[in-house]
Image: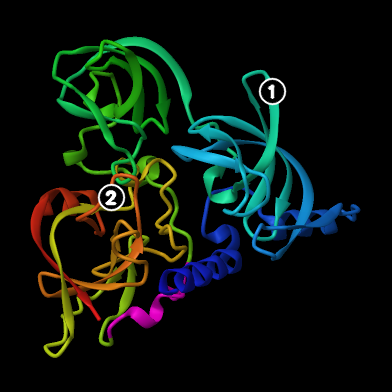
Amino acid sequence: MKNRFWLLLLSAVLVFRGTAVYADVADYQTVTQEEQKENKTIQTFETDDGQGNSVKVAACSDILYVTAKAAALRSVPGDEGEALAEVGLGDEVSRSAVCDNNWSKVSVEKNGNKVIGYIQNQMLSADIQIQPENDQVEVKADSSILDYPGRKDGEVVGEVLELDQVKRTGTVNEVWSRISYVDENGAEQTGYIPTSALDLPETVQTADAGIDKKLDAGTLSESSGEGVFAEAVEAGGSVSEVNGVQVGTPVAASSDANLKPLGTFRITHYCPCSICCGPWANGITSTGVTATTNHTIAVDPSQIPYGSQVVINGQVYVAEDCGGAIKTNCIDIYVATHEEGEAKGVYYTDVYLIQ
């Protein structure tokens, strides 16, 4: 019941916050307002989200691109809908309607067939995701190969070593390069490495040299810093904004807090740059609230439910985010800059849940 309660609250937050939360695709409100401004007749209808809730749908027409590693097209605009087909990063879809619960009706060609279904707006962008390339390049620095361009969501599937020759087949926001590589079974696969690991002229420098936010990070959406998880914040913390990043003050665990040991966790760090969060990073967590330093952590929600307060080295954090690479007994702490995350590195420590 507790997990379902948080999920219901999360759904309410996503509906309320609209496009400010996610990518640059027009939402239901934007589409209907534009139609009204142009004195056009708005074609609308209602449907069900699979949980008995009525959803308003407005007709629109545009070409969009998938930003998610993998996403299902569903029979209704909701997670309870039947999965009709799977799309992945870079796939082009044709949108025919947008819903008022942050889902869109799209069509895509799969194996010669046209599949029509619904997908969340957060998994779409109006920009082409992968620019094609076709060149043989040399690796100038050892690097892990990820299955998705972003350390928080990408899982390691291989590695390249300095002086290796690789085939580059595309670039993602210039920050990541898609390459072909041969896996341990001798099969050719596709993966992503930072463009900075390749010997290319006038390209992105190594991560240690810093992150150019104009190139490497999206724009942080404006936010009050409040949300459904605000009540989980311990008293005494405050939030300010520095260089577009919400910075919170550290909050120490109360001496009389009731702590439940969760075990030893692998602690990593991430920031709102494209190296960490992918080229479409906008500072918004998977729960719809703006990430805040000294406060937000990414967790495996099946192990630590969203909204939980946990104590790491005496400091209180709130589980507000997740990532494909964040598995059991792993926590990713949100920090302000890439340099800070690199400096703090990776370590193991005991973690406690505040009950």
Q: Residue at x 69, y 60 (%)?
A: 100
- Location of residue 247 with respect to 348 vertically, above or below: below
* Relative image position of residue 274 (x, y in whole percent): 35, 42
Tell which tag, 1 or 2, sits nearer the viewer.
1
Question: Which residue type carries mark 1?
Answer: Asn
The residue that label 1 is drawn on is: 113
Q: Residue at x 33, y 60 (%)?
A: 243
Q: Residue at x 20, y 18 (%)?
A: 139
In the drawing, does residue 280 fall left or right of residue 137?
right
Residue 246 in view, yes or no: no
The residue that label 2 is drawn on is: 326
Local packing at callout 2 (Cα closer than 10 Å; few below 14, some 14-19, many 20+) is many
Q: Nearer the N terminus, badge 1 or badge 2?
A: 1
Dot 1: element: strand
Dot 2: element: loop
* Relative image position of residue 250 (x, y in whole percent): 20, 75
Residue closer to the observer: 326 or 317 = 326
Range of magenta residues: 223-234
Q: Residue at x 34, y 59 (%)?
A: 302
Residue 196 in view, yes or no: yes
Q: Any magenta on residue 348?
A: no
* Relative image position of residue 276 (x, y in whole percent): 30, 45
Local packing at callout 1 (Cα closer than 10 Å; few below 14, some 14-19, many 20+) is few
* Relative image position of residue 225 (x, y in whole percent): 42, 73
Residue closer to the observer: 86 or 343 = 86
Residue at the front extreme, as displayed:
1
The Cα atoms of the two marked residues, 1 and 2, are separated by 35 Å
- Location of residue 172 with respect to 101 vertically, above or below: above
**Labelled pair 1, 2 in contact (Cβ < 8 Å):** no
In the drawing, does residue 251 fall left or right of residue 281?
left
